[in-house]
Image (cartoon, rainbow, N blue to C red):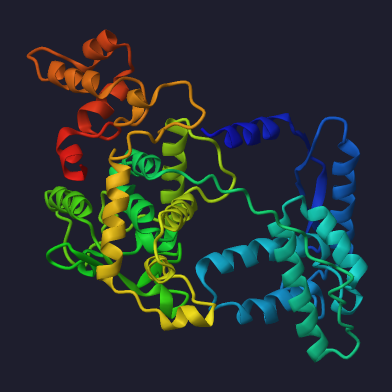
Amino acid sequence: MTPGQKKSLEARKALKEYRPTLPTGKYDAQGNPIMERKSFYYHPGEKHLAEAAAQDYLRTLLVAPKSESGPREGTVDWYLVHRYAPLKADAKHNTRRAIQLASDHLSDHAGHLLAKDFKAPELAKVLAKVGKSASLRNQVRLVALEINDLAAEEDPEVRLISRRRVKPAKQRAPKVQVQTPRECLAVALSVPEQYRPAALFMAAFGLRGGEAVAPLWSDVTPLGSLMVVRQEDDEGGAKEELKSENAVREIPIPKAMATLLAELREGQRTKGLGKPSDPISATRNGTPVSENNSRRAVQAARTRLEMPAYKGRPQHIFRHSLATWLDTNGCPEGVRLALLGQSRDAVKDRYVHASTADMLPWLERWWTAATGAEPKERVWRGGTRTPSAGEKNGRAKMTQAKADAMREDLKKPGATLKTVAETYGISERQARDIREGKVWISEKVAEGVS
């Protein structure tokens, strides 16, 4: 569990519950209101806020229609259901999910209001109740303004809300902590096996999260020297086209990376996977891993390696780190843009065309830097352990020599995980990870990346 999750759990445990019996807004066959207990949560000493929320809920029911056929025509809820939802039906999965969350907030706080009565002051009150999340407030603001536009086109009594009166919240992007190639490779090799290809693609090629989990084995040439990036995962299980033409690109695969991919495919073939139509990053059932799960795997690996916490998307650190490393080492701008699939805003960049032959030397240099060719480079910034203790293993619990010796002890007759783990002062789970090569780099892999 991450520190942020622990704080969230402690905050939820500190909440108090207020459960009055309230009408549901529905009626039985005799016309009597159906009652149920509804929960409202509040912080200690703020019960009046929960009672006020219950009163707001009651006022919503008083103006709501008694019919169960749907929301009252002309209300914000009616426009959300009959106008806005069909308009956004073809949006991407992540976009629909963000819109649904914002629509729920808007419906809870102002769904009963008529569209002509929903003006800037009412929108400001809704945004004040949403919370401190700037991105959520901006999404609710966007949905409300679009609802207002749709209503104004149909009803002349609806007046447009001034964008200036309800300004968007300022979003502060978290400061990216750029990592060295060696740190990026350590994180990528510390994630579970099914997420490791996606982590390697993000670390070595700078692929975005959706691009890294989408490639199939058919996107890699038979000799393993070239990979085509042509689609991304939209978190709904389907593959979507990339955002721009520049994002569709061919990336050369360094020899060390090709060795790792070949070993991975051989392991998948023993499980009936690894066919051209199968995803490279696949679960045990052969289904593609999701971007969200890969993000959690990267975050868990960073936590195990005792790296600083990051509030943004942890897998995006790989992309920032690779771009920074290429820039500081003198990589031509055209090669960097082509490798990362970035848009070419400047006119001069549109006349520069880099080939895969131009990218390969820089990717080989990155792998050389990531596998220990830079002895002066520290692995753990600000840590208490020395670099030599953790430069080849994942958690820096022991040196690579001890890890190798422990593997040999496990091969002896009568040796068990419990006895060997007690001998070396580690847990059975850590011993199992060392034996299976999930955390510590095995000799075979070390030879392939050196």
Up the image or down, 141 lies above or below 387; here it is below
Looking at this view, is 438 or 239 the one in front? 438
Q: In the rendered image, is residue 307 in sight?
A: yes
Q: Which of 319 and 378 is in front in this view?
A: 378
Q: Where is residue 405 in the image (x, y as percent from the top left)?
A: 17, 18
Image label count:
0
Asked if residue 136 is positioned above or below residue 314 in the image, the reply reads below
Residue at position x 86%, y 77% in the image: 161
Q: Which of 287 and 429 is in front in this view?
A: 429
For this rendering, which residue is in front, 200 or 116?
200
Q: Which residue lies furthest to the left in this view?
A: 413
Is residue 276 toward the left or the right of residue 14 in the image? left
- Quarter assignment of residue 142: bottom right
Q: Where is residue 120 in the image (x, y as percent from the top left)?
A: 90, 70
Relative image position of residue 215 (x, y in whole percent)? 30, 64
Task: Look at 86% across and 82% down and name the residue there.
Answer: 160
Residue 393 x/y as whole percent: 30, 30
Is 88 displayed left or right of 213 in the figure? right
Splitting the image into 4 quarters, where does residue 219 fall?
A: bottom left
- Point out the image quarter for the C terminus: top left
